[in-house]
Image (spheres, rainbow, N blue to C red):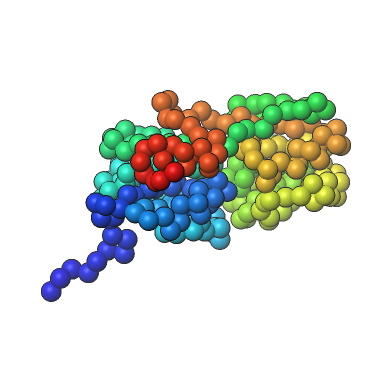
């Protein structure tokens, strides 16, 4: 009696395997651009932190790998030829694990990172290196805060009394939480009219955001500028040293073609 086949068999030698560490808009666009290409197996991996994620085209796995060592084992077992780290710009742990696993296995790694936001005339931005630094700065800037740092970042503000927070996240946040908190369950893309309405309805006088970049969540910056509101912008963590970076899906496709993983 033969053993049953694994649910996701490793690609045969004549079929190349690309792992996309995803969850972002760019990761889904990359998977869509590569879906169905002959001679290529594409696996998109999602962390599983969102209850109802938007699934990319093609093969999808959900859940962690068990750290850098677990990811390295997976790369070997699944005969992965290239890894594209298209995770969120603030997913520093996963990016670090990807770099360590790629170094341990010799698998090429490319990071896909959309450009960060840049201030324009009229913006009142306050850049800080961390959520803790954002929390320390807030009391001097306002009392009614639109917090768009994601549900896992809300805990950094839990100790602030005297401030009222309106926090927006895809899923409900978990304690610790600020005492005065109103949660908006929503996900982008957001519209400029919608962001104006949120700021006015909740009488927001300061906005906190991570420098995620991209167009899906940028309208809040325009709305804040129109209303003359200060915006606390948390800078991105650096990528691991030596990891090459592409700023767009077309650039990733060009790099993959240079590797011979796909045709031009």
Q: Give coordinates of residue 215: x percent, y percent.
A: 68, 43
Number of numbered tags placed on the structure image:
0
Do we see residue 36 in this rendering? yes
Do we see residue 24 in this rendering? no
Q: Residue at x 47, y 42 (%)?
A: 253
Answer with left or right where residue 53 lies relative to residue 222: left
Quadrant occupied by the N terminus? bottom left
> Which is nearer the eye, 137 or 178?
137
Above or below residue 134? Residue 38 is below
Dividing the picture into quadrants, the one containing residue 236 is top right
Q: Residue at x 40, y 53 (%)?
A: 42
Q: Give coordinates of residue 153: x percent, y percent.
A: 60, 41
Q: Give coordinates of residue 115: x percent, y percent.
A: 60, 33
Quadrant occupied by the C terminus? top left
> Which is nearer the eye, 159 or 227?
227
Q: Residue at x 85, y 32 (%)?
A: 228
Answer with left or right where residue 202 lies relative to residue 169: right
């Amino acid at each position: 009696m033969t053993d049953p086949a694994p649910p996701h068999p490793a690609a045969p030698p004549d079929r190349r395997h690309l792992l996309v560490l995803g969850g972002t808009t760019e990761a889904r666009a990359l998977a869509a651009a590569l879906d169905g290409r002959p001679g290529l197996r594409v696996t998109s991996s999602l962390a599983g932190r969102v209850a109802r994620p938007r699934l990319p085209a093609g093969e999808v796995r959900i859940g962690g790998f068990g750290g850098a060592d677990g990811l390295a084992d997976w790369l070997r077992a699944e005969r992965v030829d290239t890894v594209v780290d298209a995770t969120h710009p603030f997913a520093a742990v996963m990016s670090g694990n990807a770099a360590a696993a790629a170094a341990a296995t010799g698998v090429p790694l490319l990071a896909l990172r959309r450009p960060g936001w840049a201030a324009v005339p009229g913006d009142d931005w306050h850049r800080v290196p961390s959520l803790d630094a954002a929390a320390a700065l807030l009391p001097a800037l306002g009392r009614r805060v639109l917090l768009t740092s994601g549900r896992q970042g809300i805990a950094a503000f839990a100790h602030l009394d005297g401030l009222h927070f309106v926090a927006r996240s895809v899923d409900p946040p978990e304690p610790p939480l600020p005492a005065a908190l109103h949660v908006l369950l929503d996900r982008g893309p957001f519209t400029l009219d919608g962001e104006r309405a949120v700021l006015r309805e909740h009488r927001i006088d300061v906005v906190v955001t991570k420098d995620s970049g991209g167009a899906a969540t940028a309208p809040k910056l325009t709305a804040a500028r129109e209303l003359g509101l200060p915006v606390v912008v948390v800078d991105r963590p650096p990528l691991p040293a030596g990891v090459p970076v592409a700023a767009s899906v077309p650039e990733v496709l060009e790099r993959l073609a240079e590797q011979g993983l796909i045709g031009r």
